[in-house]
């Protein structure tokens, strides 16, 4: 097989489409449950109120917004691969964004921006305080603004959207490697993600690893749990062939998340017994 054959084969495995949608159409897709922004992702994407306000400013000023990447599921619903925070900001602005439990989140109140300082304090619609609401022409301007969408069609290779997500959210991204892995796990197997998250709350584990607030914020506790599960049964010879650690952990995480015979109970018992022993023996000095 030569290089051109590899290129042709890989291109054939990814079927895509793309066009522009108005913000109003993006809002309608969400209200009709025809798009999944994965509310679980909100813990990984840390846009501030200021960043959200700058996005709204860009829309109002006609500054192009980067395209949204989605993957079309077999049921026709779009999974958002890249653009969760952009869409979530617009949904929160319109007062329709919901959390994991399905409850409406408080509508977004905007902050002053560089070019629109009077945007500060404004919201989509406040019947009791019209002076704090965006006017109807301003809301229509937002709803008629266009954002491009690139679609990975359901006929594509089943791994295409995870590859795309990883590439779009690494290198220059504000997400840590583990936050990218967490997001992929949520898309692949929420049960597996929640299982790992539960292990990361184990009191003995937390006392032994004694992580800083910054490390916890970047989900390093989850990475350590992943490392435990991945490395526990690996041979010394296999460990010598790992190569790039980040890529290796991501590939193994995807593999384990799709393993229908994964021994959840056995692995959880091993994890908890290990850190109970370490806590009893050396506690917070375990990894120092």
Image (cartoon, rainbow, N blue to C red):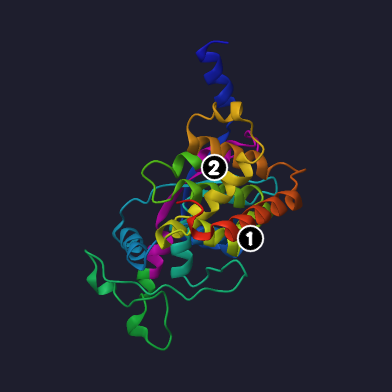
Count every numbered label the image shows and give the total: 2
On the question of residue 34 being in view, the answer is no
- Helix or strand or loop: what does disc 1 sit on? helix
Which is nearer the eye, 212 or 250? 212
- Helix or strand or loop: what does disc 2 sit on? strand
- 28 left or right, relative to 126: right
The residue labelled by disc 1 is 198
The residue labelled by disc 2 is 151
Estimate how packed mark 2 is, as few (under 14), some (14 to 19) or many (20 or more) residues with alpha carbons within 10 Å: many
Q: Position of residue 235 (x, y in %)?
A: 64, 31
Which is nearer the eye, 236 or 201? 236
Most extreme residue toward the top is 2
State how far apart marks 1 and 2 are (Cα): 33 Å
Residue 234 occupies quadrant: top right
On the question of residue 47 being in view, the answer is yes
Q: Position of residue 109 (x, y in %)?
A: 38, 75
Q: Which residues are magenta?
A: 139-165
Identify whether 218 is placed above or below 169: below
On residue 263, the disc is none
- Determine the residue positioned at 49% across, 29% down: 243
Identify whether 44 is placed above or below 49: above
Most extreme residue toward the bottom is 128
Instruction: Say whether residue 141 is magenta.
Output: yes
Residue 126 occupies quadrant: bottom left
Q: Position of residue 51 (x, y in %)?
A: 34, 62
The first of marks 1 and 2 along the sequence is: 2
- 72 left or right, relative to 126: right
């Amino acid at each position: 097989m030569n290089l051109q054959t590899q290129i042709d084969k890989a291109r054939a495995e990814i079927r895509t489409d793309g066009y522009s949608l108005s913000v109003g159409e993006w809002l309608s897709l969400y209200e009709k449950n025809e798009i999944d922004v994965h509310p679980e992702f909100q813990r990984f994407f840390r846009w501030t109120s200021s960043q959200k306000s700058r996005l709204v400013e860009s829309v109002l000023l006609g500054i192009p917004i980067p395209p949204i990447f989605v993957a079309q599921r077999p049921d026709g619903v779009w999974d958002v691969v890249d653009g969760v925070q952009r869409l979530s900001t617009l949904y929160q602005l319109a007062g329709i964004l919901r959390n994991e439990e399905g409850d409406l989140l408080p509508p977004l109140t905007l902050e002053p921006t560089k070019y629109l300082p009077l945007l500060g304090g404004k919201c989509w619609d406040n019947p009791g305080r019209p002076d704090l609401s965006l006017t109807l022409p301003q809301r229509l301007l937002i709803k008629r603004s266009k954002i491009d969408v690139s679609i990975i069609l359901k006929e594509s290779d089943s791994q295409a959207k995870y590859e795309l997500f990883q590439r779009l959210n690494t290198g220059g991204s504000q997400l840590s490697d583990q936050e990218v892995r967490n997001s992929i796990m949520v898309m692949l197997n929420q049960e597996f993600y929640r299982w790992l998250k539960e292990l990361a709350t184990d009191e003995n584990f937390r006392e032994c690893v004694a992580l800083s607030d910054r490390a916890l914020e970047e989900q390093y506790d989850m990475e350590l749990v992943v490392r435990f599960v991945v490395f526990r049964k690996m041979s010394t010879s296999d460990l010598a062939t790992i190569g790039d650690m980040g890529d290796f952990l991501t590939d193994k995480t995807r593999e384990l998340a799709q393993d229908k015979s994964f021994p959840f109970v056995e692995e959880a018992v091993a994890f908890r017994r290990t850190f109970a022993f370490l806590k009893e023996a050396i506690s917070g000095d375990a990894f120092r």
